[in-house]
Amino acid sequence: MYSLSMDKYLKLLRKELRPAMGCTEPAASALAGAKAAELLGDKPTSLSVVTSRDMVKNAMGVGLPNCSLKGIQAAVALGACGGDTSKGLSILSELSDEQIACASAVPVTLAIETDIPSLYIKVMAKSGKHSSVAIISGEHDRFSYLEQNGEVLLSLAVDACGSALAEEDELMLESASLSELLEYVKTAPQEALDLVLEAQETNMAIARHAIDHSYGLSVGRIAAEPIGKEPKSLAEAFSLGSAMAAAASDARMAGCPLPVIINSGSGNQGITLTVPVAVVASYLKSSKETFARALLLGQLIGLSLTARKNRLSALCGAFTAAIGTACSFVYLLGGELVEMDRAFNTMVGNLTGIICDGAKMTCALKIYSCTEAANLACKLAFRGLSPGNESGIVGKTSVESMDFLSRISHEGMEETDKTILSIMLGKQS
């Protein structure tokens, strides 16, 4: 029998583990543009976009699927010029030549606001005497405001701090401990296991594709060359998992038209939490159930850490996701809470300073580094080694370290985020 909180975990998994085509910030931007055009009833003659610095940062350098366009304005225009809102975050999975030509021609203005959530985009569309407004905020496909010719059709509260998981039944993740998540994982229902198994199948498909094709910096493809496709030792399995995760990101950041199952609204986090675990589980010949529960643990840790910070922030999401990956490795190898706690704290002591400077080809480098760090954290954990709370921001336990990560994200990295975007925008000019 499952408690109410356990049912809520399943509800969260159903909502969070969804497919997306390309980077999720451009996809959300295209979705907002498509909804504005849908309300307008016509292709717009002009578009105005108001958004946050983090949305601009994460759309600036990433490729859009099925075209050569880049940037948040291009994504909004593609959505407004024929995007199908029913496709959700896979809205860029199909683009016609007419749609691309329209998007290249329609004027789009852009303004960056500061007193809005980090995940926020407002699209205002005009055509003749008609106008419309569509706002997505809080989550990548959550419409919080809709307006048609001055009439308000939808108006929901927008969390000023941009909380990643705003609904009451999701707030439990902000206080969920590693032990509570592990307790759920050990008795989780089959539907939860099926969700994570399906997610890794989708993400492994783009990883396998990218190992055989050149995208971006080819981080994963080159890193995998000395190993080949069949690891001969656990060490090689760890390294191949890192390489294949990086390869999937190489492809995704370059606009590869293959879907990814996301975690916390991020495809790169979804990749980090599935691909390395799948490679190691295959080498170990883990049972399907052990594999699934290891995946589930990582996914929930990823969601829990995101709930403690902004969904978009200056703290790299590949790093927080890789903490979940490290704990998944420990689970696969028969470890328990004590080893997971060690691995968690080792990750915090190692990579907490890694920044997010937008979605772009170097995300593959960060995923490779973070998953290699997860490999090391797992190995140290089984030797009984991890940093103690005398080590900088590392806590006595993972629970305390989680709180410190939250403080760093909210209190410590606000100015860092501003500086990052300032540098990025300065290069554009």
Image: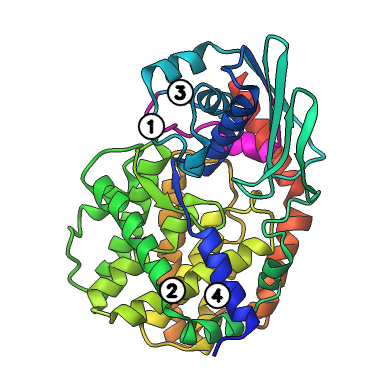
Q: Nearer the viewer, residue 211 or 29?
A: 29
- From the viewer's perspective, is the residue at label 4 or at label 3 nearer? 3
Residue at image x 56%, y 55%? 317
- Amino acid type, mark 1: Glu
Residue at image x 51%, y 43%? 88
Relative horizontal placement of residue 170, taking residue 80 as reference (left or right):
right
Residues at circles 1 and 2 in contact by the CB criterion of under 8 Å: no
Residues under labels 4 and 3: Cα distance?
Answer: 39 Å
Residue designated by label 2:
191
> Label 1's element?
loop
Q: Does the magenta stretch include residue 416?
A: no
Res. 16 mark = none
Res. 69 mark = 3
Residues under labels 3 and 1: Cα distance?
Answer: 14 Å
> Residue 277 at x, y = what percent?
36, 69
Residues under labels 4 and 2: Cα distance?
Answer: 27 Å
Residue designated by label 4:
344
